[in-house]
Amino acid sequence: MSITNETSLRDRQIACIERMLMFNKETSSSDLTSGLDGQEMVWKVLVLDSKSTAIVSSILRVNDLLKSGVTVHSLIQQKRTPLPDVPVVYFVQPTQENINIIVEDLKEDKYAEFYVNFTSTLNRELLEDFAKQVSGTGKSAKIKQLYDQYSEFVVTEPDLFSLEIKNTYRQFNDPQANESQITSICDNVADGLYDAVMTIGSIPVIRAPKGGPAEMVAQKLESKLRDYVINTRANSTSASSSLERFVLVILDRNIDLASMFAHSWIYQCLVFDVFKLTRNTITIPSKGEDGQEIQKKMDIDPKDFFVNANAHLPFPDAVENVEAALADYKAQAEEITRKTGVSELSELDPSSNNDTLQIQEAVNKLPELTSRKAIIDTHMSVLASLLSQLESKGLDSFFEIEQGQDSPKSRQRFLDTLKDGKTTNLEDKLRTFIILYLASPSGLPADFVKKVEKYFNDQEYDIGALKYVYKLREIMKLSNLSFQNKSLENGHIDNKNDNANANSSLLLSGLSNKLYGLTEGKIQGGVGSLISGIKNFLPEKKTIPITNLVEAIMDPLNSSQKNLESTDEYLYFDPRVIRGSHTKKPKRQSYNKSLVFVVGGGNYLEYQNLQEWAHSQQGNAKSVVYGSTSITTPTDFLQEISSLG
């Protein structure tokens, strides 16, 4: 599900880039992603900068570029070979440096025709400078197009995007930051959000809490959207005339700090937490032949069938499903070898002229089977590496402790983990302690806090991040307990004193013993059946604060009174009505579609929880796009707030 016409944000950005590569020709096809069919192919050069490389590499592979006629792609700053008979498509940020390089290429007749595309809006000053420089070359006829593509955001999942603006939380919360710095960041964030809204193709109603960075971004974005609406009113096909409105919810990271530190059991969240997951590439530390540690990179294709089916599932489900996928592959391979008489698939020759029907059928199936096997092998390797990390760091203990309510039992279990003798998981211990601290309504006992602080000091481990959390806890208006949680499995509101977590200490009992005996690097020998038993011990799926807040705005009829009262105070902006709309208290109304954006860092846990909620709405599934200034790992976020402590 996605914002408009059931097309995901990723599909829309892919369509935009592919259309650009076909010289921005509109197609009659209603399928945005198949607009290249039937068009005459023109071979071309694609020139990118670092930002546009991030945008393109997250959604397209080299083969996809080839299908769009791109034979060469290179960076604008690098020395490039002249190809005077070939057209060039530039896709770069609208900067003075990039404009100067394009003009130099024009002077040198480096390419036959120039199709210039900017990632976001080229301002008037730069546009006039570009026109003046081009005019001075006497070769303006070679510039065939000049487009703003509104694409300055990176999409890594169907409905997840990042502006890749780092350290915004620290900059917004740094007492030393001056007003011009804050304003500049807010301008950048509003520009990126504007591009996302333009790509979606509909003008939203904007909601934001008062008194923080989210309000500043909302005001700047509303102004930009209002100008757009005024300038395009005469155009009946413009985005402003879209019938169904969606709601854009802009939030400050302080709405819920705990989710930035939480240990999740969801497959994608675990990969992001334990390894490095950037722009659909997983980096896993492994041992080389000489015993030295090397960084092994695994590319995850946006069309990866296993990720699309399992990213949102608990880790044990993913283990079970990779086993099932391997068994299915083996069954198909065995059937082909039996029918064709070869001993293994590699013996089939795609270039063979053998016209036996069974051989031809087998050869036709071969590319898809080979691709499936490569994907299965990748996830086998990732899951095996995860198992190894779970064992060495004892991550299941932290997950289990975080699931329980704050209690003497939870605190004792945490103290027990401090005695495990492990120093590879000091960061995990600090994260779990922060969550216990944030989740305690009346504060943790002083003697417990002292014991924990002494442990970290004895290990000479920096607790600057913890000191910042102490400070923030004193002034936080909204803690984890400000929004009532809801079960995603039966729709009931969880009362603070219910028994939902009564069995938390048993949830993952024995998990490590069952999983960690496996041979490293292999998942085999009936693990699937073992895992399916463990699944029954996983905690009930619940909403987290951001999801409760979004539900209160999108679906007020099914939200709790407490959550509604919290969001009723949010500002309301509508770029399509007269100024001053945000001064009125908005009526509660339902929305089917939303874009949820967090200023100060986001994470996969919130994305997956929002998607889980959106799809659990029986008979009325919601559509939620999630974005942030950056998708930030717990490690990076700890470092970010440590400097504030």
Image (cartoon, helix red, strand yellow):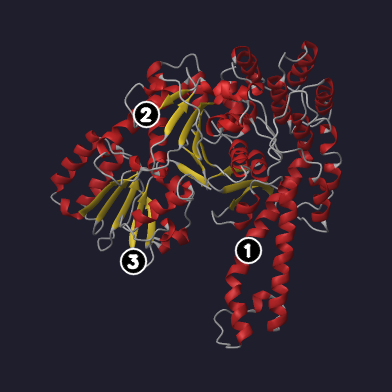
Q: Amino acid at mark 2?
A: Glu
CA gap between label 3 and label 1 equals 30 Å
Residue at mark 1:
372
Q: Amino acid at mark 3?
A: Gln
Residue 492 in percent (x, y) is at: 70, 33
Residue 308 vertical placement versus 118 (above, below): below
CA gap between label 1 and label 2 equals 46 Å
Residue at 27% x, 35% y is 123
Front: mark 3 or 1: 3
Residue at mark 3:
39
Residue 522 vertical placement versus 539 (above, below): below
Who is closer to the viewer here, 159 or 87? 159
Badge 1 crowding class, 10 Å Cα cut-off, few under 14, some 14 to 19, many 20 or more, is some
The local secondary structure at tag 2 comes to: helix
Badge count: 3
Q: Is residue 462 visible?
A: yes
| Mark nearer the N terminus (3 vs 1) | 3
| Mark nearer the N terminus (1 vs 2) | 2
Residue 506 vertical placement versus 406 (above, below): below
Residue 222 placement: quadrant: top left
